[in-house]
Image (cartoon, rainbow, N blue to C red):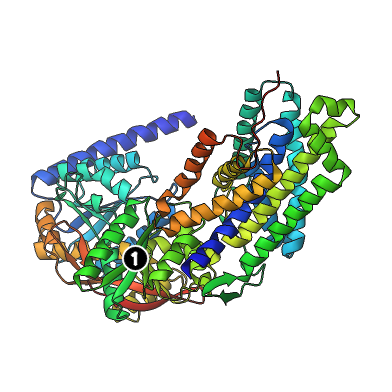
Amino acid sequence: MEWLQQLINGISLGSIYALIALGYTMVYGIIKLINFAHGDVFMVGAFVGFYAIKGWGLGFFPALLFSMAFCAVFGVLIERIAYKRLRNATRIAALITAIGMSLLIEYGVIYARGAQPEAYPDNVLPSTSFNLFGAQISSQSLFILSVSVGLMIILQFIVHRTKIGKAMRAVSHDMDAARLMGINVDRTISYTFAIGSALAGAAGVIFGVYYTKIEPLMGIIPGLKAFVAAVLGGIGIIPGAMVGGLILGVVESVVSAMGFSLWRDAAAFIILILILIFRPSGIFGKNTREKV
Amino acid sequence: MKKKLASVFMASTIFAGVLAGCAGGAKESSGGGNSDTIKLGINLELSGNVASYGESMSKGIEMAVDEINKNGGVDGKKFDVVKVDNKSEAAEATNGIIKLTSQDKVTAVIGAATSGNTVAQAQIANDTKTVLIAPGGTSPTVTVDEKGKVRPFVFRTSFIDPFQGTVAANFALDTLKIKDAAIFADNSSDYAKGLSDAFKETFEAAGGKIAAEEAYVAKDTDFRATLTRIKAKNPSFIFIPGYYEEVGLIVKQARELGIDVPLVGADGWDSPKLVDLAGAEALNNTYLINHYSSEDPDEKVQNFVSAFKEKNNGEAPNAFNALGYDTVYFLADAVKRAGSTDSSKIQAELAKTKDLSLVTGVVTIDENHHPIKTATILEYVDGKQVFNTKVNP
């Protein structure tokens, strides 16, 4: 039952990618900016959760919520300070600012606390593993999977059933028309950053609990992988990010399972290249013709 | 006024230095130094980023020198120690040995604690025909240059990295009685590659079977897929040469996947962070190789431990203390057999060292100046390192 085990490994990994990818995709959908600082918001979330658990003795859920709230505020601050004034600038200017922001956060954290890694305490979640058709499933990974799925369902609800979700969809469709309809575009963009960053914060805490080790540069690779996942699903499309994340996680596990563990990171980027060549709009994207 | 004082002081030191230089030169020409002292240079990391290694070794060296001098020295010759601080920098290490060989005219130099800072001194040691002994450099390049040629005047007390792979294989075969093993190595470090090659060679030569050979890259965090693959091959032992940051996660994830066989690693595991990362429970039934353990019941070790504790307010000596201590005895043994303080004679005797019993094990020097010596196996029991056994090569 090795393959069942590998599938479970892949889905657990993929659900973390999916949570991060959602933030990428939402921000891209609304202001067409690839927010490279997003992976670092994920890292900040992991550290906030760590200090909440270790320093204040909070349990998993309070720490998760606190980290999400902290990251939501942090994400809005990034947007207000760095991106808002570039809204009418060229896209390349905003992209470079995002990379600068990413480095600033990474090295700011190193400056504040040093580069040494930290280990999440292992008693945050009960960890028993049970046997399903010969595959070992730890209660932690099930828990993590259900928290991720729960957050995605809440997100779908917000986007499709609430007023602010409607505003987001409107702004993403046509910013000028939305403004003419009386939608407060700036506030909607801030909400988008808040929700995306909160999901990254949640992913950070979940990552910490599942993988134990956190360090200031931990956001780089998961951030890039989540970007690949977002492009794979079709950037700007919310269900696409979830599916893209899960597919990427499973593909990475399968690559390792076949004995090419050293090629695992390469596999993710090969997928990115193939998608950009053959289906640039992603799995869920429609080929829209540019209107003249 | 202050300035004037300082310049007077400077002038007098320089003058004294010149005098000392003359005196040393005079002795040298009259045949290999003063006959009742052995001038010993110490070139260690006493400040800088690895200062803790250097300081520990220095403590061990001083203790050994005091002991030998108190007991009448080596054939009546007492050690006279000159210390320099290389500030944990290669350039300073080179400056240090230049000072020791040209100004202080030492017979032998002990240092440095790390491989890089020792290699920085090797050229000078060979050119000036001064014996250089590294207490702690575990890289093979310390005593063998990049062309594979032995550096004649350079020796070491610690075992080399790949040797730990041999020890791990012998431990699996002889102590655990295991015939099929898996290797899960860090593919991005020469250290881990050297260890896994040596392990494979020894293990297969003795009839063992390598069931799976997998690799990872430093900074990875998810090892579950590869571990699942290893698990499917059902090895009864997994050798994991690597550093504690990844090893901690590997051990934790392996136990979660239900891999309960012994996991074995080398000195790269040795950090308190490993216990934080893996968790005390997951570390049960794992072993690591190290130079020495203060819990070793061997009489020689226990004598050393109690003498050290007496001198250092009850603090138990670590591996670096022990290596520093042993280095002096290693040198003293060769001086005794050479019956002279002539560097070339001591060099020849050091190379012939055989079955010398030291705190960190019984040492025999091979043709590459690598010690073939006993290694200590420590076992993790509830997050604490406990002495398990000693493995002879």
The residue shown at (51%, 33%) is A277
Residue B393 location in percent, x, y? 22, 71
**Residue A97 to residue B340: above or below:** above
Could you say which is closer to the camera, residue B215 or residue B284?
B215
Residue at mark 1: B212
The residue shown at (76%, 54%) is A153
Could you say which is closer to the camera, residue B228 or residue B370?
B228
Disc 1: CA contacts within 10 A as few (<14), some (14-19) or many (>=20): some
The residue shown at (51%, 52%) is A251
In this rendering, position of residue B257 left or right of residue A210:
left
Judged from this view, the residue extending furthest toward the right is A182
Q: Is residue B208 visible to us here? A: yes
Residue A27 location in percent, x, y? 71, 37
Could you say which is closer to the camera, residue B335 or residue A258?
A258
Residue A97 location in percent, x, y? 64, 29
**Residue B93 to residue A291: above or below:** below
Residue A74 location in percent, x, y? 74, 42
In this rendering, position of residue B73 left or right of residue B236:
left
Q: Is residue B320 visible to us here? A: no
Judged from this view, the residue extending furthest toward the top is A292
In this rendering, position of residue A56 left or right of residue B94:
right
Q: Toward which corner of the image does residue A123 lie, by quadrant? A: bottom right
**Residue B261 to residue B47: above or below:** below
Could you say which is closer to the camera, residue B363 or residue A272?
A272
The residue type indicated by label 1 comes to Ala
**Residue B126 to residue B207: above or below:** above
The residue shown at (51%, 70%) is B257
- Tag 1 subunit: B
In this rendering, position of residue B182 left or right of residue B221:
left
Q: How many marks?
A: 1
Q: Secondary structure at mark 1?
A: strand
